[in-house]
Amino acid sequence: KWLCSEEGMPQLNPKYWISQIFWLVAIFATLYLILSKLILPRISAGLETRKSKILNDLDEAKQFKIESEKKIKEYEKILNDAKNQSKIIVSESRKKINHDIKEKKDQLEKEIENELNKAEDNIKKLKKNSIQNINLISIEISSEIVKNVTNGEVNKSNVSAIVEDISKKQMSKYL
């Protein structure tokens, strides 16, 4: 009867303390061995794997950051080069267009000047021809008027000389 009510709680009985200490040490030693040899190495290995994975991921992230910064710099350089190239192309195109416009303008001015010269020549010819035609018409009309007024034949050479003399005097004003 070791669990008598008179004796009290067995844990507090000094008679059982040695066996309790033995079992306490045996259980805790077994737990310690199981934890230290089986469970804790697995946990440590998992933590180490996780730590190395995190460090590798951080290193990769740094590499990607460095590469992305390089790519951004390359992109900016390419973009600036393209802008400069486009400015050069626009400038050259503008120069070429201005040059072409100037050539066309000069050519058009020459053509206009040639046309004006031709028109002036035509006007001079028309004036000359019109003077001769006016003289012929004047001679005809004057001859008819003198013939009708005098009721006789008129000397056309006399009328012609008079009309030519008057037209020369009058034409000097218009030429």
Image (tube, rainbow, N blue to C red):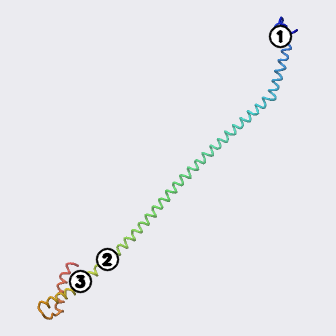
Q: Nearer the viewer, residue 57 or 84?
A: 57
Where residue 174 sits in the image (x, y, percent)?
A: 21, 78
Q: Image height check: is 163 above or below 89?
A: below
- Count the numbered circles shown: 3
The part of the image, by quadrant, that contains residue 128 is bottom left
The residue under label 2 is: 119
Quarter holding the N terminus?
top right
- Camera-near label (2 vs 1) is 1
The residue under the point 42% across, 66% down is 101
The residue labelled by disc 1 is 10
Estimate how packed mark 1 is, as few (under 14), some (14 to 19) or many (20 or more) residues with alpha carbons within 10 Å: some
Q: Write the residue at 23% across / 83% down.
A: 131
Task: Name which residue type carries label 1.
Answer: Pro
Q: Residues within 10 Å of mark 2 (few under 14, many from 20)?
A: few
140 horizontally vs 46: left or right:
left
Q: Is residue 37 left or right of residue 119?
A: right
Label 3 is placed on what type of residue?
Ile
Circle 3 packing at 10 Å, graded few (<14), some (14-19), many (20+), is some
Question: Which amino acid, by three-letter code, is at mark 2?
Answer: Ala
Q: Which mark is residue 131?
A: 3
Splitting the image into 4 quarters, where does residue 163 fall? bottom left
- Which residue is rendered at x = 19% and y = 88% of the image? 140
